[in-house]
Image (tube, rainbow, N blue to C red):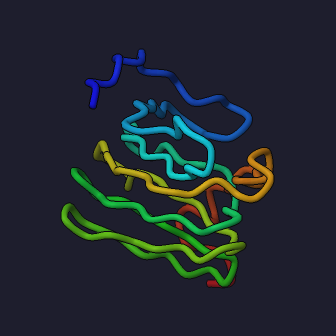
Amino acid sequence: MNIEASVPTTKNPPEQFAGDVWLDVIAAPHEAGQRATVALVRFAPGARTAWHSHARGQYLRVTSGVARFGDRDGNIIEVHPGQTLYTPPGQDHWHAAAPGCFMEHIAILEAGDDPAATTTWKEHVTDAEFDGAVGA
């Protein structure tokens, strides 16, 4: 057993996020065969990810604020503290803080068979997609 060394908070890159988003790694693989990564992710009001998918899916546990999650069908789900959202493998989605509040979630995912393909990043989410105005 050992206490994990602290890793500095990182700001997520603008190629994959719009607005200010910070990440703290909680757990990452240490040994062969381990796949799980767990991170605490904090979003400024209205900040969001780009469209993306995960090879093995992802769990997102909201710990504070109000989260918004969207899919390619135009569905937007608001998730509150204590709720967990699951996105299945390969499903395009985005996550964000609702307007006017910070949001924090714990992200849990497993590396894909090719670790470089664990997350596939795509285009940025438009304001209309974020607002739910697409197809309205």
Q: Nearer the viewer, residue 48 or 33?
A: 33
Where is residue 12 shown, x and y percent of the image?
57, 30
Q: Quadrant of residue 98?
A: bottom left
Q: Is residue 123 visible?
A: no
Q: Indicate the quadrant where residue 71 lies.
A: bottom right
* Residue depicted at x 64% and y 53%: 111
Query: Which residue does the image show at 63% across and 64% down from the upper left?
Result: 128
Q: Residue at x 79, y 45 (%)?
A: 116
Q: Nearer the viewer, residue 118 or 85?
A: 118
Seen at 76% across and 58% down, the residue is 113
- Indicate whether 119 appears above or below 88: above
- x and y percentages locating residue 58 in the rendered image: 52, 64
In the image, is residue 106 above or below residue 54?
above
Q: Position of residue 13 (x, y in %)?
A: 65, 29
**Where the C terminus falls, by quadrant?**
bottom right
Left or right, 2 with respect to 118, comes to: left
Location of the N terminus by quadrant is top left
Q: Is residue 26 visible?
A: yes
Horizontal side of 128 relative to 95 (left or right) equals right
Q: Is residue 73 left or right of residue 7?
A: right
Q: Position of residue 42 (x, y in %)?
A: 37, 38
Closest to the observer, 27 or 47: 27
* Left or right relative to 110: residue 55: right
**Total label count?**
0
- Give above or below for 1 relative to 53: above
